Image (cartoon, rainbow, N blue to C red):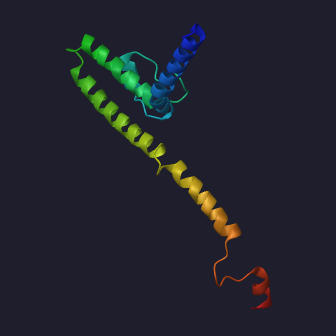
Amino acid sequence: MSKKFQILIASLSILGLTVFFGCAAFQKVLTPCYVNPASADYANTETTSVLPWTTLWDMERIDIKMDYVHMTNQVKDKMLYEFLKTGNRVSIMASEELQSTIFSPAGPIGLIFPTIFGGTLGALLLKRPGDKSPKEVANGG
């Protein structure tokens, strides 16, 4: 094998792995998620990192950071931790449900395009038996 061919294979492999692992992460970065400001304060981190709104990725990042902070301060703040973790679980579950709805085949995009095309065909191209044209309606026929 030539060196150029090996470099090409390695580059394609890296590109393939990037696409394979990047798709789910990309969806998490785009899916909005409510982040309780108290959770971010507890984790001592910013609520947003990539986009100007909070995302599922930000919530999971804050959740992991909260675990780390909690392990270091476990005794004194157990009640606050449990309260905030419950809120995080609710936010994560709601955003994952939203993510599955948006990106599913029966989601908004999967339903809008067939409706647009079907409505256009029905309104412009197809005539049902018994429908009258504007000329027939004007003539009273």
Q: Residue at x 67, y 72 (%)?
A: 126
Q: Residue at x 44, y 34 (%)?
A: 33
Residue sitting at the far front: 1
Residue sitting at the far bottom: 141
Q: Measured from the top left, where is residue 115 in percent x and y?
A: 58, 59
Q: Measured from the top left, where is residue 103 in percent x and y?
A: 48, 42
Q: Measured from the top left, where is residue 27 in percent x and y?
A: 48, 33
Give above or below for 23 relative to 116.
above
Q: Which part of the image, by quadrant, shows the N terminus? A: top right
Query: Is residue 65 in sight in this rendering?
Result: yes
Q: Residue at x 56, y 12 (%)?
A: 7
Residue sitting at the far top: 3
Q: Measured from the top left, where is residue 9 in percent x and y?
A: 53, 17
Which picture quadrant has residue 133?
Answer: bottom right
Front residue (pair 117, 91): 117
| Residue 138 placement, left or right of 72 | right
Which picture quadrant has residue 117?
Answer: bottom right
Query: Is residue 54 in sight in this rendering?
Result: no
Question: How many numbered discs sit on the rendered protein?
Answer: 0
Give above or below for 96 relative to 140.
above
Which picture quadrant has residue 73?
Answer: top left
Q: Which part of the image, by quadrant, shows the C terminus? A: bottom right
| Residue 98 placement, left or right of 125 | left
Front residue (pair 50, 37): 50
Give above or below for 131 relative to 73.
below
Front residue (pair 81, 93): 93
Q: Residue at x 31, y 33 (%)?
A: 89
